């Protein structure tokens, strides 16, 4: 059985998937105001390529008595994803 954890950002109103198996955090291409492309690809667990489109800096408020500032990779996803790199970057 697979369980998923989602966390709500009060500032943007977005719901982020917390993915402990993912290495890098990602933001949704459709919500990013960029048309640039990148030669960097991510790879899904099934081996398929995920095209990236640059970076997006966000300030996040999950109701934890502090805000978090983090730079996400812009990519095609069904949800914005918080991954291992987010947690390892905390002060």
Image (tube, rainbow, N blue to C red):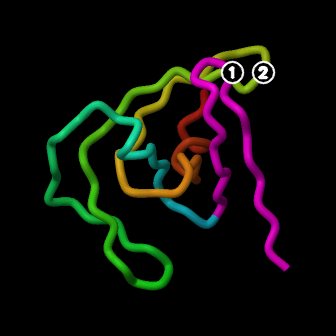
Residue 37 forms part of the magenta stretch: no
- The reply to whether the C-beta atoms of the residues labelled 2 and 1 are less than 8 Å apart is yes
Which quadrant of the figure has residue 88? top right
Q: Mark 1 points at which residue?
A: 10
Q: Looking at the picture, how far across and down is residue 80, in whole percent?
A: 53, 46
In this rendering, the answer to whether 21 lies above or below 61 is below
Q: Nearer the viewer, mark 2 or mark 1?
A: 1
Q: How many marks?
A: 2
Q: On residue 63, which mark appears? A: 2
Q: Which of 76 and 24 is in front in this view?
A: 76
Q: In this view, does 4 lie above or below 2?
A: above
Disc on the earlier residue, 2 or 1: 1
Q: Is mark 2 on a helix, strand or loop?
A: loop
In the rendered image, the quadrant that contains the C terminus is top right
Q: How crowded is mark 1: few (under 14 residues within 10 Å), some or many (20 or more)?
A: few
**33 shown above or below 17:** above
Range covered by the magenta-colored residues: 1-20
Residue 37 appears left or right of 18? left
Q: Position of residue 45 (x, y in %)?
A: 50, 79
């Amino acid at each position: 059985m697979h369980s998923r954890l989602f966390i709500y950002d009060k500032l943007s109103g977005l719901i982020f998937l917390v993915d402990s198996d993912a290495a890098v955090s990602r933001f949704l291409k459709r919500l990013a105001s960029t048309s640039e492309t990148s030669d960097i690809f991510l790879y899904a667990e099934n081996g398929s390529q995920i095209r990236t489109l640059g970076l997006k800096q966000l300030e996040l408020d999950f109701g934890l008595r502090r805000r978090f500032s983090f730079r996400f990779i812009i990519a095609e996803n069904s949800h914005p994803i918080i991954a291992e790199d987010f947690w390892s970057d905390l002060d």
